[in-house]
Amino acid sequence: MASKTTNPFTFLQQVRSETAKVTWPSRRETVISTIMVLVFAVIAMIFFFAADQLMALGVELILGIGR
């Protein structure tokens, strides 16, 4: 298989033209998405903390070890 090389100038032109095609999110969309990620991370943190505490309680009750 023959390798096809492109000179750096042509490569940068192609990168610039492809980057121009990208639809970038607005500042508002970025802020809303960031807030949503943080809220869901907190929800997941609370869920896994509660699940861990319940499992620890179950192990303590069943086996009498822990804590």
Image (tube, rainbow, N blue to C red):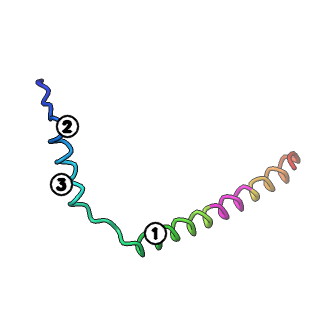
- Mark 2 = which residue? 8
- Mark 3 = which residue? 17
Measured Cα–Cα span from mark 1 to mark 2:
36 Å
Measured Cα–Cα span from mark 3 to mark 1:
27 Å
The residue type indicated by label 2 comes to Pro
Q: Nearer the viewer, mark 3 or mark 1?
A: 3
Q: Is residue 36 left or right of residue 46?
A: left
Q: Tell me if mark 1 has few (under 14), some (14-19) or many (20+) residues whose alpha carbon lies within 10 angstroms of its own.
A: few
> Do the residues bearing badges 3 and 2 touch, measured as CB atoms within 8 Å?
no
Q: Residue at x 81, y 56 (%)?
A: 57
- Spot occupied by residue 33 in the image (x, y as percentages of width and height): 46, 69
Predominant secondary structure in magenta?
Answer: helix
Q: Nearer the viewer, residue 21 or 56?
A: 21
Q: Tell me which segment is drawn in magenta.
A: 45-52
Most extreme residue toward the front, as rendered? 9
- Mark 1 = which residue? 33
Secondary structure of residue under mark 3: helix
- Spot occupied by residue 44 in the image (x, y as percentages of width and height): 60, 62
- Spot occupied by residue 34 in the image (x, y as percentages of width and height): 49, 67
Q: Earlier in the sequence, mark 1 or mark 2?
A: 2
- Spot occupied by residue 9 in the image (x, y as percentages of width and height): 17, 41
Q: Is residue 4 above or below residue 57?
A: above
Q: Earlier in the sequence, mark 3 or mark 1?
A: 3
The residue type indicated by label 1 comes to Ser
